[in-house]
Amino acid sequence: MISGLQHPNLVRLFGCCIEANQLLLVYEYMENNSLARALFGPEEGPLKLDWPTRQKICLGIARGLAFLHEESALKVVHRDIKTTNILLDHDLSPKISDFGLAKLDEEENTHISTRVAGTIGYMAPEYALWGYLTYKADVYSFGVVALEIVAGKNNMKYRPNENFVCLVDW
């Protein structure tokens, strides 16, 4: 399924290897690592992302999601959009990766009822609480990622005071 999804804002799968209980996926090399690393960085500091670059990253993620949801022959709900699953190439162009939790959507469904999987803090409330999965779950997660890109703060680590649990509350 992953190899059938080809778009400039989706990471390319070159191959896989299954040997005994080992599964290896071979993706294209993304020299700037993840968006999380670029924003929140290693100890020596995150990348310096100017506003045009941040906008380019947001638009690229949105284009990738639009492809998954509307333009691809396979309609896919990713279910785990977050900064660690957005990889950056040498030009800092974003590519959505890690389709391990993705669900195929048949067009006759208005939603998919499913066991909840994903990352707390990025999950849409209706999905986290009731397992009600639509494309809107990915859009909500993208909104959290966009907020992290604009604020430069990590949703999972942002605790300004006891009145806020996460960046979304802020």
Image (cartoon, rainbow, N blue to C red):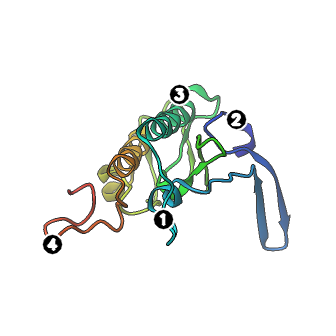
Upstream in sequence: badge 1 or badge 2:
2
Q: Amino acid at mark 1?
A: Gly
Dot in front, 3 or 1: 1
Gap in Å between the C-alphas at discs 4 and 2? 44 Å
Q: Which mark is residue 6?
A: 2
Are the two marked residues, 4 and 2, in contact with CB atoms closer than 8 angstroms?
no
The local crowd at label 3, few if under 14, some if 14 to 19, many if 20 or more residues have their Cα within 10 Å, is few
Upstream in sequence: badge 4 or badge 2:
2
Residue 101, picture quadrant: bottom right
Q: Amino acid at mark 2?
A: Gln
- Tag 4 residue: 162
* Circle 1: element type: loop
32 lies above or below 160: above
- Tag 3 residue: 70
The picture places residue 41, in percent across and down from the top left corner, at 49, 64
Q: Amino acid at mark 3?
A: Glu
Q: Which mark is residue 45?
A: 1
